[in-house]
Image (cartoon, rainbow, N blue to C red):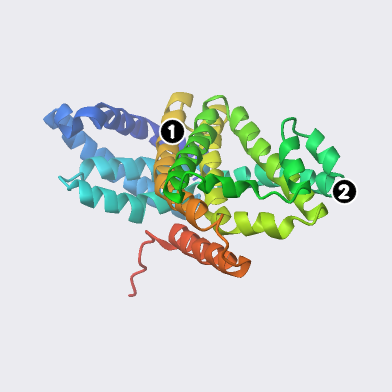
């Protein structure tokens, strides 16, 4: 059977299941009649069988991804329990967040590339001529002058105390992540702009620092918190790109349904990023501007990176049963 024939045959049942799930979204299964509950169970079992067929016969087709999301949503509705908030919190961070990250990694990669390419270009330009680099982004001239003067401007964040600095940084980082995410509603165009602007800024400053012999000072500040902070920006940016892409290419879904699904995943990613930004802000407020040796700050970066990506790539995976 061709994938198209499979879709035509099964799609009415999938659409009916989606309609029942939409009705039960706010009030739970209590919003459905006894007949509808029976129908929901039948359609859920049918969708599960359809997913097994799709995984076997059409593993790379979009219908498999669609059915995977539909079955997951139906499973949550059918087997929803009266879990405590604590259990829900643990389930989110041990299962839902890392699984959502892996399911949407391509968007995170796209966000990373959109940051990286302007960063590389601006680094080369600024390294060859810091003045030319400054011309790429009006308003950054003061930072270039600080680099020329060997002025470590980041140390001023501790003038009001490290706790206050860390709190300010956490708030600012969360704001940037939310901006990268929320910008996705404009077809992802503004998200791309935010990512490119941040990459451009880092490239200009890093290139000028390398050219003017200030690189060890700069990386001594950026190294410790950069791994987590930049990773979160890429995840939040990828979440924003999902919103735009769901409108441009909704696939088998209507644009509204595709946008709702993308918004749900994007919100999960953004919520999962908040504790990471708190950790990054604490590192940036207490460790990054300190006089600790660069080697120790690099060790913090390496360890935090291993822990972060070990968690994102491994947490929540189903155990393979041995027969």
The answer to whether residue 94 is left or right of residue 195 is left
Q: Position of residue 130 (x, y in %)?
A: 83, 44
Quadrant that contains the C terminus: bottom left
Secondary structure of the residue carrying tag 2 is: helix
For residue 188, what is the image quadrant? Answer: top right
x 46%, y 39%: residue: 174
- Indicate whether 291 appears above or below 130: below
174 versus 26 height, above or below:
below
The circle on residue 75 is none
Residue ID at (83%, 49%): 127
Residue assigned mark 1: 263
Q: Which residue is mark 2?
A: 128
Left or right of residue 137: residue 323: left
Q: Residues within 10 Å of mark 1 (few under 14, many from 20)?
A: many
Quadrant position of residue 224: bottom right
Q: Residue furthest left?
A: 34
Residue at x-position 39% and y-position 52%: 52
Location of residue 115 in the rendering, given as x and y in whole percent from the top left corner = 66, 43
As drawn, which residue projects farthest toward the bottom? 323
């Amino acid at each position: 059977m061709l994938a198209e024939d499979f879709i035509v045959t099964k799609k009415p049942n999938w659409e009916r299941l989606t309609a029942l799930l939409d009705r039960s979204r706010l009030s739970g299964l209590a919003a459905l009649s006894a007949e509808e509950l029976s129908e929901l169970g039948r359609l859920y079992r049918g969708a599960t069988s359809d997913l097994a067929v799709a995984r076997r016969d059409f593993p790379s087709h979009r219908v498999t991804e669609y059915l995977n999301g539909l079955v997951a949503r139906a499973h949550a509705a059918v087997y929803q329990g009266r879990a405590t908030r604590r259990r829900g919190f643990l389930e989110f961070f041990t299962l839902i967040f890392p699984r959502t990250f892996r399911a949407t990694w391509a968007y995170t990669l796209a966000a990373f590339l959109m940051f990286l390419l302007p960063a590389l270009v601006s680094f080369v330009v600024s390294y060859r001529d810091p003045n030319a680099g400054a011309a790429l982004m009006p308003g950054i001239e003061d930072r270039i002058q600080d680099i020329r003067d060997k002025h470590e401007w980041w140390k001023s964040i501790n003038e009001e105390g490290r706790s206050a600095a860390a709190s300010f940084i956490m708030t600012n980082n969360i704001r940037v992540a939310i901006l990268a995410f929320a910008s996705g509603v404009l077809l992802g165009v503004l998200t791309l702009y935010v990512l490119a602007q941040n990459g451009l800024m880092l490239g200009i400053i890093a290139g000028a620092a390398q050219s003017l012999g200030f690189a060890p000072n700069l990386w001594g500040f950026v190294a410790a918190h950069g791994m987590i902070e930049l990773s979160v920006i890429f995840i939040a940016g990828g979440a924003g790109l999902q919103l735009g892409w769901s409108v441009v290419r909704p696939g088998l879904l209507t644009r509204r349904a595709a946008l709702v699904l993308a918004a749900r995943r994007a919100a999960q990613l953004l919520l999962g990023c908040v504790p990471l930004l708190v950790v990054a802000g604490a590192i940036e407020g207490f460790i990054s501007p300190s006089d600790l040796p660069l080697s120790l700050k690099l060790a913090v970066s390496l360890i935090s990176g291993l822990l972060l990506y070990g968690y994102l790539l491994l947490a929540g995976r189903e155990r393979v049963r041995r027969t």
